[in-house]
Amino acid sequence: MIFISDIAKERVLKIWKEDNLTSEHFVRVSVTSGGCSGLTYNMHFDNEQRPTDEVFEDKGIKIVVDPKSILYLLGTELDFSEGLNGKGFYFNNPNAARTCSCGESFSL
């Protein structure tokens, strides 16, 4: 399962409202090769679900992940920071052995 923090949920809902997205939209999360640690997180809003997608819902937010990425993301929490470092959305991934300082890439 993939989880979402309360603050990330509020930020997602705010973006949905600002961008006039519908209830058909969801958060799509994936992992691709790249970044300074080897694997990079990707996140965007989507409204086209594929037959092979894994679908999770936490706190009323639908999160969709492709089958390859789910292996890297199980147990991960999507979070959001408004701190001084301006981090934005980030992932708390218990599977990551190492992350880069920007928090956008990781390795196992």
Image (spheres, rainbow, N blue to C red):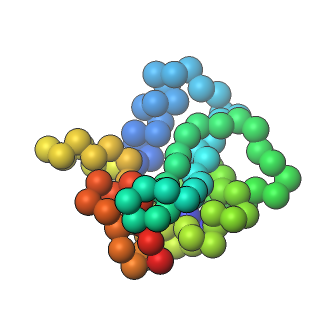
Residue farthest toward the right in the current orientation of the protein: 51
Q: Which one is nearer the viewer's eye here, 65 or 57?
A: 65
The vertical placement of 106 against 42, above or below, is below
Residue depicted at 49% across the width and 62% down the height: 39
Residue 73: x %, y % from top left: 55, 68
Q: Is residue 69 left or right of residue 90?
A: right
Residue 87: x %, y % from top left: 27, 46
Residue 82 visible to an observer of this rendering: yes
Residue 33: x %, y % from top left: 55, 59
Residue 17: x %, y % from top left: 49, 25
Residue depicted at 32% across the width and 44% down the height: 88
- Which of the 4 image quarters holds residue 10? top left
Q: Is residue 21 left or right of residue 24?
A: left
- Which of the 4 image quarters holds residue 54? bottom right
The vertical placement of 60 against 36, above or below, is above
- Which of the 4 image quarters holds residue 90? bottom left
Residue farthest toward the left in the current orientation of the protein: 84
Residue depicted at 14% across the width and 44% down the height: 84
Residue 4 visible to an observer of this rendering: no
Looking at the rendered image, the quarter that the N terminus falls into is bottom right
Residue depicted at 46% across the width and 30% down the height: 15
Q: Which one is nearer the viewer's eye here, 58 or 78?
A: 78
